[in-house]
């Protein structure tokens, strides 16, 4: 195999793609628009449909044994321009009321000064309620301290932390976290782009006849196969990088909206659930997994494509495969609460989804990353070699298919 | 005469149960244009594709400059250039980009210089336009440039004038003659007998995958008593068929 020839094959495959504006728009720029819109609009639509907007009155269950100070009750009932007020409901057990959905949020006041917020925290509405109540409590505390120290700036710095009690049921927690959404979005985008590109430069090249023209040069068939795998992998990784940027930007935007948003610019909660902790290791892991998964997809689809009779035939078979992967990914949605076994990292595709989730949370271990990357690269090499053998056997050229 | 640069011996090409070429033998020397004549489906393209290593023979032997295209594919393709009818080129590339792309696989010391030479030689002022906008004649000129970018001493042209206008067709015929004059071995496959009559030193007539007759144009005309190659071809094909139906 000649590295210079491999690079030339990549150039020959990528150059026409880069010249097609539609291609770049569809696979690289679209995620930047579609993903934030989807991830932001879905919870907003859910909130609007349930009448749970930022300023609409909501029921706040308070412990009847510990009544709120009059001033605090007034602030909570009246609300602020940026955060609506609450209908206060004194109950015996605010946690049970919130868990049973009789109140959107609960509050326990300790006369010694501490506050306990009870919410179905991991649900879309719960996160918004916590944010609204937090705004009103911060306002009340700042007002109280300002009255003592006479300086609103010092007062805001002295405001005590509020403890939040999660009243969500385990089922709500699993459903509400939607933790797999982030790796799912990235993996699906990667798969979709790699599939399209790999088919274009394998069957597409064969159907257009340009593969035969290429094989009239002294390029080795291994260089052709590896070059095409790398070309499809590069486009796929560019698209999934774009999807990743879109997810992070969504997290940043959601911090500006009443949709949760996380604690800092590097610790982001998605409005629909899921979390990204941006650390150098997590980001390195994320991209390592994306690149190696992209190469594996590309090699498999290239090999698969060479054995398909036509583009339509290949697309039909691959859409069935894509759906299988999607269903597996959706099933993994609930595995956030499961213990991850080491064999998962040795299982193609599954390892990518799990490792991306862990990379997003920055909990990916070096062993898991190494296993995932090694399995992906070994299999990518295997499928690329099989694709090259298919070329050597002359199975891919028009007129020789019947041989 | 010097040693044959193209050797085909008892070649057989099969597609599944169908035999496309059967027991075909011929040789072509440097400085010679060998015409491979026959109707569509006669087995011409299958034969030529085995020369470029695109198809493996089911039986027989094929050698280009003494090498087997299946075993020494890269070495064979460094000495062979092939132009087919409407050889596809990447539509989104310009002609120059396509020549750079295909030319880079030959590791030439001065690829840009060679492209500039061919641009002038083959009259291609359109080389910086996208191939998608080219006419058939313009595409074929770029294809010819692609096939000879590495100055091969074996040239294979398969129905290279299909769809070309009179001027472009004339250009291809002159190009073939020029290649012969510089010492290349040329296989010129066509079903247009007048072209073969004009440019070929020897011709092999194939029909149904078999060689019906071989010789210079003059020899074939004498053999059949025909006044031109087209009539000679029809006569030879008809003789072969009557031999086949004879008990």
Image: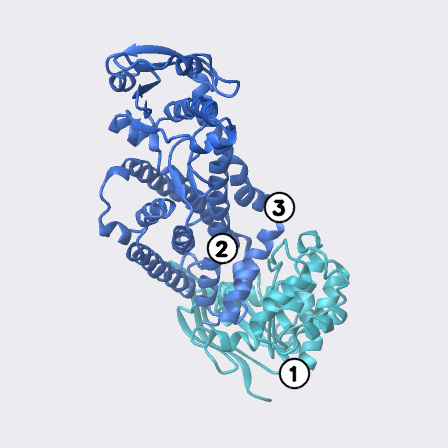
Chain colours: A blue, B cyan
- Cβ atoms at labels 3 and 1 below 8 Å apart: no
Give the residue at x 51% y 76%: B76
Q: Is residue A298 above or below residue B198?
A: above
Q: Using the numbered discs, state the Cα–Cα distance from disc 2 to disc 1 in whole angstroms.
A: 45 Å
- The circle on residue A234 is 2
Location of residue A97 in the rendering, given as x and y in whole percent from the top left corner? 27, 15
Can you name the residue that lies furthest to the front here?
A: A149
Q: Using the numbered discs, state the Cα–Cα distance from disc 3 to disc 2 in whole angstroms.
A: 17 Å
- Residue receiving disc 3: A21
Q: Nearer the viewer, residue A310 or A243?
A: A243
Mark 3 lies on a secondary structure that is helix
Give the residue at x 69% y 74%: B114
Q: Is residue B195 above or below residue A293?
A: below
Q: Quadrant of the N terminus of chain A?
A: bottom left
Mark 1 lies on a secondary structure that is loop
Can you name the residue that lies furthest to the bottom here?
A: B1
Location of residue B234 in the rendering, given as x and y in whole percent from the top left corner? 60, 64
Location of residue A267 in the rendering, given as x and y in whole percent from the top left corner? 42, 41
Q: Residues within 10 Å of mark 3 (few under 14, many from 20)?
A: few
Query: Marks 3 and 1: which is nearer the front?
Result: 3
Q: In the rendered image, is residue B245 in sight?
A: no
Q: Nearer the viewer, residue A227 or A250?
A: A250
Q: Residues within 10 Å of mark 2 (few under 14, many from 20)?
A: many
Q: Share a chain, discs 2 and 1?
A: no
- Cβ atoms at labels 3 and 2 below 8 Å apart: no
Mark 2 lies on a secondary structure that is helix
Horizontal placement of A386 versus A224: left or right? left
> Going from the N terminus, do you reach mark 3 or mark 2 first?
3
Q: Share a chain, discs 3 and 1?
A: no
- Residue receiving disc 1: B183
């Amino acid at each position: 195999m000649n590295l210079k020839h491999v690079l030339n094959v990549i150039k020959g495959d990528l150059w026409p793609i880069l010249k097609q504006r539609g291609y770049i728009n569809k696979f690289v720029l679209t995620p930047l628009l579609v993903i934030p819109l989807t991830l932001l609009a879905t919870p907003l639509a859910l909130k609007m449909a349930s009448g749970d907007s930022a300023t609409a009155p909501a029921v706040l269950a308070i412990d009847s044994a510990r009544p709120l100070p009059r001033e605090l009750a007034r602030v909570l009932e009246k609300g602020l321009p940026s955060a609506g007020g609450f209908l206060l409901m004194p109950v015996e057990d605010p946690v049970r009321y919130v868990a049973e959905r009789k109140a959107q949020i609960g509050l326990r006041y300790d006369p010694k000064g501490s506050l306990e917020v009870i919410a179905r925290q991991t649900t879309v509405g719960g996160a918004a309620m916590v944010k609204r109540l937090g705004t009103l409590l911060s306002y009340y505390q700042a007002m109280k301290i300002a009255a003592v120290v006479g300086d609103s700036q010092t007062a805001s710095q002295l405001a005590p932390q509020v403890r939040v009690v999660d009243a969500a049921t385990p089922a709500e927690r699993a459903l509400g976290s939607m933790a797999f959404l982030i790796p799912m979005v990235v993996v699906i985008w990667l798969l979709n782009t790699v599939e399209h590109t790999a088919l274009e430069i394998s069957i597409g090249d064969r159907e257009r006849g340009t593969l035969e023209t290429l094989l009239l040069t002294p390029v080795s068939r291994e260089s052709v196969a590896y070059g095409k795998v790398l070309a499809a992998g590069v486009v796929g990784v560019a698209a999934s990088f774009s999807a990743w940027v879109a997810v992070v930007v969504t997290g940043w935007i959601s911090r500006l909206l009443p949709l949760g948003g996380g604690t800092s610019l590097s610790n982001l909660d998605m409005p629909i659930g899921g979390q990204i902790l941006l650390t150098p290791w997590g980001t390195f892991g994320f991209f390592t997994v994306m690149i190696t998964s992209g190469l594996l997809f590309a090699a498999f689809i290239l090999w698969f494509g060479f054995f398909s009779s036509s583009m339509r035939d290949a697309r039909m078979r691959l859409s069935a495969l894509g759906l299988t992967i999607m269903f597996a990914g959706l099933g993994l949605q609930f595995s956030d609460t499961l213990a991850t076994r080491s064999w998962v990292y040795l299982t193609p595709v599954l390892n990518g989804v799990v490792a991306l989730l862990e990379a997003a949370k920055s909990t990916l271990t070096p062993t898991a990353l190494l296993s995932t990357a090694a399995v992906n690269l070994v299999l990518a090499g295997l499928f690329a070699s099989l694709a090259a053998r298919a070329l050597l056997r002359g199975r891919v050229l028009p007129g020789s298919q019947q041989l | 005469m010097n040693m044959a640069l193209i050797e085909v011996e008892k070649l057989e090409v099969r597609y599944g149960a169908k035999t496309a070429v059967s027991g075909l033998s011929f040789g072509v020397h440097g400085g010679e244009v060998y015409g491979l004549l026959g109707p569509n489906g006669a087995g011409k393209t299958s034969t030529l594709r085995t020369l470029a290593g695109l198809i493996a023979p089911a039986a027989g032997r094929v050698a280009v400059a003494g090498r087997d295209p299946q075993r020494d594919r890269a070495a064979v393709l460094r000495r062979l250039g092939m132009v087919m009818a409407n050889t596809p080129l990447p539509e989104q590339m310009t002609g120059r980009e396509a020549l750079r792309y295909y030319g880079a696989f030959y590791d030439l010391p001065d690829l840009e210089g060679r492209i500039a030479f061919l641009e002038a030689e083959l009259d291609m002022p359109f080389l910086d336009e996208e191939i998608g906008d080219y006419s058939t004649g313009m595409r074929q000129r770029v294809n010819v440039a692609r096939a000879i970018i590495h100055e091969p001493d074996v040239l294979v042209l398969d129905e290279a004038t299909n769809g070309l206008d009179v001027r472009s067709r004339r250009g291809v015929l002159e190009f073939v003659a020029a290649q012969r004059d510089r010492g290349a071995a040329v296989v010129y496959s066509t079903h247009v007998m007048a072209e073969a009559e004009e440019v070929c030193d020897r011709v092999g007539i194939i029909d149904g995958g078999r060689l019906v007759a071989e010789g210079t144009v003059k020899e074939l005309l004498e053999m059949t008593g025909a006044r031109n190659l087209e009539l000679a071809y029809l006569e030879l094909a008809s003789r072969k068929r009557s031999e086949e139906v004879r008990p």
